[in-house]
Amino acid sequence: MRRGLGRLLAVLAAVVALLALAGPASAHVGGGAAGSDFDARVLQVSPQLPGVSVRSLQFGDELELVNTTDVEVHVPGYSGEPYLRIGRDGVWRNANSPATWINLDRYGRTALPPSADADAAPDWEQVSTQPAYVWHDHRTHWMSEGVLPPQVAADPGREHVVSEWVVPLRHGQTDVQVAGVLTWTPPPSPWVVWLPVAALVLAAAAAGLLARTPLALGALFGAGALAALWHAVATPEPAVTVGSHAGALVSALLPAGATLLCAVLGLRAARRGRGALTGLLAVVTGWLLLVQGLPDVDVLWSANLLTAGPQPLARVAVTVLVSLGVGLLVGGVAAVRRFRETPAAPAGTAAGRPVPAA
């Protein structure tokens, strides 16, 4: 048992090191919501500009513009005043534009300073040295907090187009329009979400609380590891101002790799009949699953999800991460308390086999 605890401490040290390397990016990329019933997407940039790309992020809360051409892209504010200049030398923002201050809050509730005047001469401040910028734009999302759009409130059982929006740009002397659409989709039924969650939590807890051997608990490690690996591989591409997709994948794969390591050791301990050690590894694995699943838990009750893979698989992965995480924590603690290992005995006896505590 002492040898097993020593190995477990080594595993814990490796896990902590991996999570420290992963840092904040091991959670959902960008730090925002992982799910929403609203969704905004860019339909067309007209005319098309080779070297200029525009996409919607965070279900329409933000716009990202990348300009690799030699000509600046100008983004006007809500009154047509100069707001942003994005070019090879970086990004410049007009401190006198009301949009600079209005965009600080999702619902535009920021108090404007006296200097914010659409007619004032621009006061350009450099806010980035990259030829790319992500900003909050109120033209692309629903602006009433806690209130559904009228068409949605009248018929919440089906998908609706909430608005068709346009963000104007200027590339040199060329006027450009970014056209997009904001939609709303009904969320999944609570029965579809909470029944699997409850079933997985109860199954994992029962494996530690009731099973006569640790094999039932060990069998659950594989499901958790697979969910962690898929969740990492399906990490969505972050904003270019945050980091690269490859970096985000590596960061997400570190805790998934730690989960896989614990799962292999836990399954091995279970097959060898090491009940207490299996329980300890179940606690560690459950914690790791929750670390990865909880930042994205809102995908369980949202219609649209941020994922690089199929949305149903993303919802299944987070369901497994969160449910098994809770269940393995409970079942693991129970297994540690229930199973004990008998002292050494002559060959041919059942020495070292797990015995449920009286």
Image: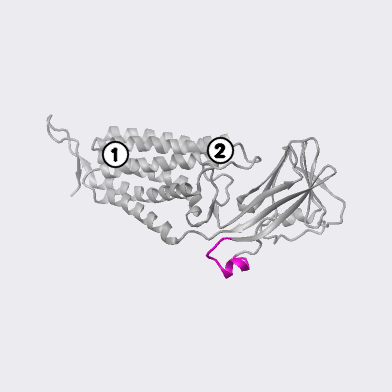
Name the residue type under label 1.
Leu
Assess disc 1: are there few (<14), some (14-19) or many (≥20) residues with their C-alpha within 10 Å of its C-alpha. many
| Residue 223: quadrant of the picture | top left
Identify residue type, mark 2: Ala
Element on which disc 1 rests: helix
Residue 43, given in percent of the width and then of the height, sits at 67, 49
- Secondary element type, mark 2: helix
Q: CA distance from mark 2 to mark 1?
A: 33 Å
Residue drawn at 80 percent across, 40 percent down = 72
What are the residue bounds of the magenta stretch? 146-159
Q: Is residue 347 above or below residue 267?
A: above
> Label 2 belongs to which residue?
248
Q: How is the image coloured?
A: one colour
Position of residue 267 in the picture relative to residue 130 (left or right):
left
Residue 156 in magenta stretch = yes
Question: Disc 1 designates what residue?
Answer: 277
